[in-house]
Image (spheres, rainbow, N blue to C red):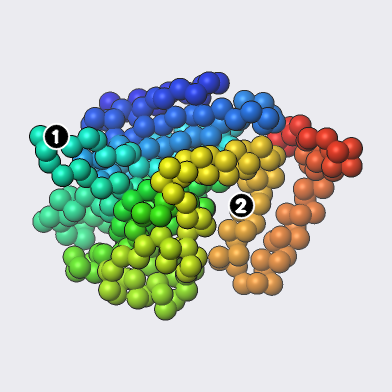
Amino acid sequence: MTCIQPYVQTSVLFRLCMNDDILLIENVPVEGTFPEGGLISVWTLNRPDKLNSLNSDSHKLLKEACDMVESNDLIRVIVITGAQPNPPKDGKKPKPSSFAAGADISEFVGKNSDDVRDFFEDNAWEKIWNLSKPTIAMIDGFALGGGTELALSCDIRIASNRSKFGTPEINLGLIPGGGGTQRLCRLIGYGKALEMVLTGEMIDSEKAFSCGLINLVTTPEDLKENTMKLAENIARKSPYTTKVAKRTVRASLDLPFSEGVLMERSEFVALFDTEDKEIGVNAFLNRESPKWLGK
């Protein structure tokens, strides 16, 4: 049974409950947001013994979480991360840190195209990509295959310096199937994207940063602080204007330049009819903090 709870005004951990709580959600309040009560929704993939690999239940819960945040006006930003490994038992080697180490490959065994088509036509990667609100991937450790694609589905990526990225599907006789070939190419360019897809080799966080795959590299100890600081900054902006900004910048990926400029101009002009434009301009002129209405 899936359990989705409504928003809360204080930081409360709740769960989308299915098969050992594989997705945890914490709605974190942010001071100084207007309208008041703004939240950052932190989603944690919680299969650390499987390196947080994505299975069919993970996708189902992520899609349900997307519906939840879109229907909750208090949620301003979404942060997606992976659970840290559990302490090792009986002297066993500890598991490495992982954002999401790809798909659960055991679910691929014996499947043909008819078996997987519906799943990949309605997947969590696209649902997250199509969210109207800003999304940040907080990456610590492995982000491979579907994990890299999950990070690519987010708007911004912040990673620890022990993180690794890759698209190893080629080693299974497959290619990325969650938008990886397309988003990777748009983000880092055709040549580097094709190299990653064809070799299946991993790159570390420094290389990922240098080629534009991630926005920031930090230490594991500072990862959460740096990510939440950015999320809080965004959460304090006008929630209406934030959505407009995201869809306008996103349009540059799909529209010819001239059409994109026309869209930007249209969105810019339309904002002059909003209450938040007037609030923002007056607050700037009076050297005050704006108290947005979100409209």
The amino acid marked with disc number 2 is: Lys
Q: Quadrant of the N terminus?
A: top left
Q: Is residue 223 above or below residue 10?
A: below
- Horizontally, residue 249 falls left or right of residue 130, namely right
The amino acid marked with disc number 1 is: Lys
SS type, badge 2: helix
Q: Which mark is residue 246?
A: 2
Q: Name the residue furthest bottom.
A: 191
Q: Is residue 196 above or below residue 49?
A: below
Which of the pair 230/65 is nearer the observer? 230
Q: Which mark is residue 89?
A: 1
Q: CA gap, disc 1 to disc 2?
A: 45 Å
Residue 125 in the image: state x and y as whole percent.
39, 51
How packed mark 2 is, by other alpha carbons closer than 10 Å (few <14, some 14-19, many 20 or more), is some
Residue 215 in the image: state x and y as whole percent.
52, 57
Q: Quadrant of residue 63?
A: top left
Q: Is residue 170 above or below residue 267?
A: below
Instruction: Identify which residue is drawn at 17% across, 59% down.
Output: 112
Q: Name the residue furthest right.
A: 286
SS type, badge 1: loop
Of the image marks 1 and 2, the number of the one nearer the N terminus: 1
Q: Which mark is residue 131?
A: none
Q: Quadrant of residue 256?
A: bottom right
Residue 175 in the image: state x and y as whole percent.
28, 67
Number of dots carrying numbers: 2
Residue 118 seen in render: no
Instruction: Identify which residue is drawn at 44% across, 52% down.
Output: 159
Instruction: Identify which residue is drawn at 36% across, 55% down.
Output: 163
Instruction: Identify which residue is drawn at 35% across, 29% down.
Output: 16
Residue 262 seen in render: yes
